[in-house]
Amino acid sequence: MNTKKKRKHIEYGRYGYFFIAPFFITYLLFQLWPLINTFRYSTLNYYKRNGREFIEACGLDNFKNILGITAGEKGYFLIYFKNTVIMWFANFIPQILVSLLLAAWLTNNIVKLKASGAIKIIIYLPSVITAASVSVLFNAMFSQYGPITQTLRDMGIISEKFNFMTSVAGTRGLIAFILFWMWYGNTTLLLISGVLGIDPCLYEAADIDGATGNKKFRFITLPLLKPILMYVLITSAIGGLQMYDIPALFNVSKTGLIGQPDDQSTTVAMYIMRLYSSDVGKAAAVSVLLFFITLAISLIFFATMTDRGGKVKKQKGGKH
């Protein structure tokens, strides 16, 4: 009788699940579950009576209140969303333009820039500095009697009575500039990695055809940078619409979370934190609205930036 020896087979692939398990457990506990709870809290009303706290279902009342649809309520969400979008656009448009120019300059083989590594480090350094430090620094420099404000007055660029902290355009402009200065280096490095991933043969072929630098940038670099640009756009939209640290620390009232002047630099995230201490239901409703707006903008960017030219249409009929 022939006996077969059974060989023990160890499945090493299953051990991979143990390595990825911490991420999924952390995501479920600290992101997915709070997100689901936020949707639930947005339909609840919290109030106190006789020293006791009560919770009752209110449907879509919280959404109507923050949008100003209910009589007697002011649409603070729309006001703060407008503030957020203005400051986001004011920092993102210059950021993407400067980052594209720097990426093209630092990867240009004709220029052959010396000490490019040191320049990249210098460009990236502002993103390492904490938001609190940057906010305090810029507040001191651009305050009413700050050194930069006084220098601009002496040069005649601004009037003697101008104060960045009491000017809506001045405060918003400085917040946008701080965000631009902190994050353009990170965007530049992302774009540089995308440019370096492009096949050099394409540029060599363009040189043989006599293409200029502008045409190579327009017809080779930009189209092939679409995946990186899409990532930059989506992450910028998410971070921009949720901006909190710089506006909440730069120029706020003594009570906090009210962006000066006259609430004109208050963002949606600051509004959420302000509501959280008094009305969790409304704070959750604002978070849900911000979630759907961010999702919609991200999907629009994804739809417009996705390359559909590579899709091959199936032809009906005979063989080719």
Image (cartoon, grey):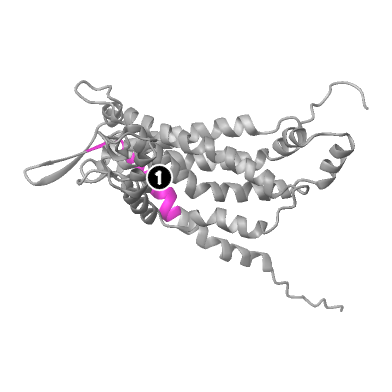
In depth, the one of 151 and 281 nearer the eye is 151
Q: Is residue 1 above or below residue 135?
A: below
Give the x, y percent position of residue 258. Answer: 26, 40
Direction from residue 93 to residue 190 in the image, left or right? right
Residue located 57% across and 42% down the image: 232
Q: Give the quarter of the figure containing the C terminus.
A: top right
Can you give x and y, in whole percent of width and height, for residue 190 in the image? Answer: 62, 49
Q: Is residue 237 visible?
A: yes
Residue type highlighted by circle 1: Leu
Q: Which quadrant of the rendered structure holds the N terminus?
A: bottom right
Task: Name the dominant secondary structure of the magenta segment.
Answer: helix
User: Which contiguous range is marked in magenta?
Assistant: 28-45
Give neighbour class at mark 1: few <14, some 14-19, many 20+ (Cα, 10 Å): some
Give the side of residue 181 with respect to residue 35, left or right: right
Q: Residue furthest right?
A: 320
Residue 1 belongs to the span the image colors magenta: no
Write the residue at 32% across / 51% down. Answer: 140
Using residue 136 as the reference point, say whether residue 24 is left or right of it: right
Q: Residue at x 51, y 62 (%)?
A: 22
Residue 131 location, x and y as percent? 40, 53
Residue 40 magenta-highlighted: yes
Q: Position of residue 53 (x, y in %)?
A: 15, 45
Number of numbered labels in the structure image: 1
Is any atom of residue 39 visible in this view? no
Q: Which residue is mark 1?
A: 35
SS at mark 1 in the image? helix
On screen, residue 88 versus residue 306, left or right, reads left
Residue 266: quarter of image: top left
